[in-house]
Amino acid sequence: MTNYPKSDYQSILLGNSFKLYLKPSALCLLPPASTQVLSVVSKQDFVLEDKAAIIWRARNMNNLEIVKQLYQAFAQKDREKILKLFEPQIEWIQNQGFPQGGKHIGAETVVNEVFAKFRVDWDAWQANVHEWLDAGDTIIALGEYRGTYKITGRSMCAAFAHVYRLKDGRIVRLQQYTDTLKVAEAMQT
């Protein structure tokens, strides 16, 4: 193993055990009290799914940008992008009385059992954000849902507030607040 001065690197704490040290061409992993490098990896060798790369991405993108990317990915039906933005065990909470209302755990569950149903049951389902509130690890999106329920042909517009929690560059939780009556009226046969 090679010893490098810590001052040559920018550091990011990984849990309580290790820090990731970054410099322009490489990264290395060290216990916080040590100067001995456990591993050095070229930036070109990053695998986007590992924790180091996620944290690297988080350093270069703020939480507001991450949540904005979610809305873009949803509009573009970009499943893979959505999954990369979500923590694998995301907690997704939608109002009771809203389609797929309740608590959903897991990125695949949210994409397959929540998002996919909107595409099946609604024409032109949209979540349009009009205002963003940035509170660091919490991002709030204020806007409105629009869509036409396929079975009834009725359109609706309902205000919403989405409260996101983020950690290490990924969305870990959503709490939805919306006018479920407007949605229910469109679905009423």
Image (spheres, rainbow, N blue to C red):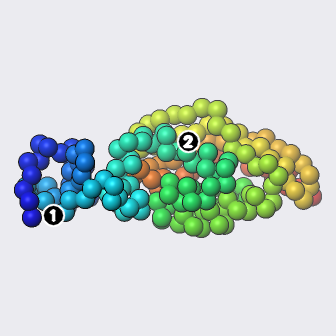
In the depicted structure, whether residue 7 falls above or below residue 95: above
Could you give the CA–CA distance between mark 1 and mark 2, rounded to whole angstroms? 36 Å
Coordinates of residue 29 in the picture (x, y in percent):
20, 59
Coordinates of residue 163 in the picture (x, y in percent):
54, 45
Q: Is residue 91 visible?
A: no
- Quarter of the image for residue 188 reads bottom right
State the mark number for residue 68. 2
Element marked by disc 1 = loop
State the mark number for residue 162. none
Number of numbered discs on residues: 2
Of callouts 1 and 2, which one flags the residue occurring earlier in the amino acid sequence? Answer: 1
- The three-letter amino acid code for the residue at tag 1 is Leu
Residue under label 1, please give it.
Answer: 38
Q: Is residue 116 visible?
A: yes
Coordinates of residue 97 in the picture (x, y in percent):
73, 57
- Quarter of the image for residue 32 reads bottom left
Q: Which residue occupies 57% across, 48% down? A: 70
Q: Is residue 75 left or right of residue 87?
A: right
User: Foreground residue, 25 or 177?
Assistant: 25
> For the N terminus, which image quadrant?
bottom left
Q: Which residue occupies 38% across, 47% down? A: 58
Q: Which residue occupies 35% across, 44% down? A: 59
In the depicted structure, whether residue 50 falls above or below residue 162: below
Q: Which residue occupies 21% across, 50% down? A: 21
- The three-letter amino acid code for the residue at tag 2 is Lys
